[in-house]
Image: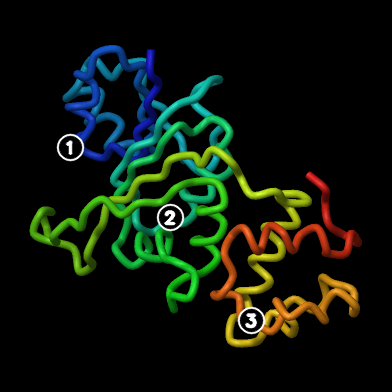
């Protein structure tokens, strides 16, 4: 039986269909108490499947692999993405609606002006795909921002890296000063002799996740967890 988690069911626009899917062990995570009460009243079959907590503060809803779906609350959508990364060992797939600008950053290719931390960290572990845009008129009331639905699927071979903590630190440090060359942006993380490599002439947005991962083996060990 497949396991499915919906994040932010709200008034149940998706939930009413997900509850009807055969062969699915379903959970929905909703923080808003009014929406929780509405869902319990409107869809009695959700009883026992509703987790009244913040998605950002819970442990994985299942002990084995599961899929994630949702019209994610835009104010915490990036944080939800990092939660997906935290759970990546168990996430079989994620299909979610984001603000279009956030979605574009997640799927952006190296060399793009919008390619950044979320692009690299996500693409190191997942294949990212923009499925379709959603018009503002699809909502009531229409929001002031455009939306897009993207899909994440685990990649079969994660790039070799010294540790995830080094990888995350390197990527975040590199893009913190993205206009500088990599040599200047990440200088504290490497010994002087390592910085002579021509790759450090590039800027952060020019490196692929694989290249970032490879550089973690050359980083200093001081103050960096090996997990």
The correct choice, above or below, for 196 with respect to 17 in the image is below
Residue occupying image coordinates x 73% and y 80%: 198
Give the structural element (helix, strand or loop) at label 1: loop
**Image location of residue 221, percent across then percent down:** 89, 59
Residue occupying image coordinates x 59% and y 41%: 157
From the viewer's perspective, tell me whether residue 181 is left or right of residue 8.
Answer: right
From the viewer's perspective, tell me whether residue 199 is left or right of residue 44.
Answer: right
**Which one is nearer the viewer's eye here, 131 or 103?**
131
**Which one is nearer the viewer's eye here, 137 or 90?**
90
Neighbours of disc 2 within 10 Å: few (<14), some (14-19), many (20+) = few
Quadrant of the rendered image containing residue 218 = bottom right
Residue occupying image coordinates x 69% and y 84%: 201
Task: Please give the residue where the numbered disc 1 appears in the rendered image.
Answer: 13
**Image location of residue 159, percent across then percent down:** 64, 49
Name the image quarter holding the C terminus.
top right
Q: Which dot marks residue 76?
A: 2
Residue occupying image coordinates x 17% and y 56%: 134
Q: Nearer the viewer, mark 1 or mark 3?
A: 3
Q: Nearer the viewer, mark 2 or mark 3?
A: 3
Quadrant of the rendered image containing residue 146 = bottom left
Q: Earlier in the sequence, mark 2 or mark 3?
A: 2
Neighbours of disc 1 within 10 Å: few (<14), some (14-19), many (20+) = few
Quadrant of the rendered image containing residue 14 = top left
The answer to whether the residues at label 2 and label 3 have Cβ atoms under 8 Å apart is: no
Q: Earlier in the sequence, mark 1 or mark 2?
A: 1
Task: Please give the residue where the numbered disc 3 appears in the rendered image.
Answer: 202
Q: Earlier in the sequence, mark 1 or mark 3?
A: 1
């Amino acid at each position: 039986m497949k396991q499915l988690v919906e994040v932010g069911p709200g008034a149940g626009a998706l939930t009413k269909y997900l509850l009807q899917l055969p062969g699915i062990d379903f959970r929905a995570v909703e923080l808003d108490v009014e929406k929780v009460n509405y869902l319990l009243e409107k869809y009695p079959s959700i009883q026992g499947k509703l987790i009244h907590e913040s998605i950002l503060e819970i442990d994985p809803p299942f002990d084995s692999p599961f899929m994630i779906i949702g019209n994610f609350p835009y104010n915490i959508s990036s944080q939800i993405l990092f939660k997906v990364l935290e759970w990546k060992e168990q996430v079989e797939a994620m299909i979610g609606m984001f603000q279009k600008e956030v979605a574009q950053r997640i799927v952006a290719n190296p060399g793009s002006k919008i390619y950044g931390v979320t692009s690299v960290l996500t693409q190191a572990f997942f294949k990212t795909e923009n499925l379709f845009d959603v018009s503002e008129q699809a909502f009531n009331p229409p929001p002031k921002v455009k939306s897009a639905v993207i899909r994440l699927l685990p990649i079969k071979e994660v790039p070799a890296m010294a540790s995830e903590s080094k990888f995350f630190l390197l990527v975040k440090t590199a893009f913190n000063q993205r206009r500088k060359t990599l040599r200047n942006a990440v200088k504290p993380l490497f010994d002087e002799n390592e910085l002579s490599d021509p790759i450090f002439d590039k800027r952060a947005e020019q490196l692929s996740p694989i290249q970032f991962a490879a550089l973690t083996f050359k980083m200093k060990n001081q103050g960096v967890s090996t997990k």
